[in-house]
Image: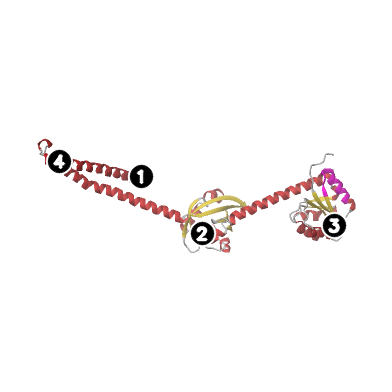
Amino acid sequence: MTKEIHSLHLLVVEDNPGDLLLIDDFLHEKITSPKIQEVRTFRAFKQLFKDTDSHFDAILLDLSLPDKSGESLLNEVMALAKSTPVIVLTGYSDIDFGIKSLSMGISDYLLKEELSATSLYKSIMYSIERKEIYRTLKESEKRYKDLFHLSPEPMWLYDVETLKFLDINNAAIKHYGFSREEFLNMTILQIKPPEERNKFEQRQINPQENYRNISNGVFSHKKKNGKKIKVDLQSNAIQYNGRKAEIVLAKDVTDRLNYISEIEDKNERLQEIAWIQSHVVRAPLARLMGLIYAVSDSESPNVLDWEEKEQHKFYSLILKSANELDQVIRKIAEKADRIKLTNNT
């Protein structure tokens, strides 16, 4: 019979020599070079874990040992086994407890009377795989919790239907001023000022359809001390303990928005000054140019003496400079008009 290519380290906790021999044969039938360790009492099992830093891929446990059995045995074995998969081997008389043992954390239970090499091998491999999946999930959960609780930005988790806070990180507690207990007794409406609260409630007519569209963007929030802040919210829908929830990252953008608003106000004032000044300056400049034209054109250059001709040249230079200045002011005025028009539209 073809053997599966696996070398596993297995612990068999069984006091019946016949069952031990049968289990040993089944394991060698399906597994290449299995490393099998046997103990026949709970005391020996306990001593094994006490004396050595033992690591097993799986533990096969008989529920009836000479010195301990049933629920008491299972509880103590599970405590010592920690993350190692435990497969219970039971008889028909113990089948009810075998089923119950699944809720106590065992990986599987097998009836001794129906045991075969294939069923034993599959149970071992499935149990090891389930434990690996569980370990991976626990590691992912830990990474999520680390990202959540160690984030420098406020984050929280809330129930989509009740709007109650389900979890809150330390950054949010510090930034908003509420304690963890206060947050967990609040809904997200309680950190919103009245005007934002009303808008939020109007959009909550059908929360199952709308909730993914109401938590992204910039909104007003209120701290415990009553101070209003602007926050940029980014959120994602998740399942939390079987309920629809939303995890939210809140970035306080109050200072940034105030700075942008201040810059925009200054730009608007500068544009207004440029528009006014360009139009105000053009009026006296136009009058000045008119006077220069009048003086320089009062007599024909052909009848002027030398001194008057030099004076006429001087007027021409002044007029040229005035024209250049007029062109500069005209461009400033045109640009100011365009900016003003753009801002108004």
Element assignment for label 1: helix
State yes or no: discs 2 and 1 in contact (Cβ < 8 Å): no
* Residue 213, percent from left and from top: 52, 48
Whether label 4 touches label 2, CB < 8 Å: no
Q: CA distance from mark 2 to mark 1?
A: 37 Å
Q: CA distance from mark 1 to mark 4?
A: 48 Å
Q: Position of residue 96 (x, y in %)?
A: 80, 55
Taking the spot 38% from the left edge, 51% from the top edge, the residue there is 264
**Callouts 3 and 4 close, C-beta under 8 Å:** no
Indicate the secondary structure of the residue bearing disc 2: helix
Q: Amino acid at mark 2?
A: Ile
Alpha carbon distance from label 3 to label 2 = 58 Å
Nearest to N terminus: mark 4 or mark 2: 2
Q: CA distance from mark 1 to mark 3?
A: 88 Å
On the rendered structure, is 211 left or right of 286? right
Residue that badge 2 annotates: 191
Residue occupied by mark 1: 342
Q: Tag 1: residue type? A: Thr
Precedes in sequence: disc 2 or disc 1: 2
- 284 or 197: which is nearer to us? 284
Residue 182 higher or lower than 201, as above or below: below
Q: Nearer the viewer, mark 4 or mark 2?
A: 4
- In the rendered structure, which segment of residues is drawn in magenta? 19-35
Residue 237 lies left or right of residue 262; in this view the side is right
Question: Which mark, residue 64?
Answer: 3
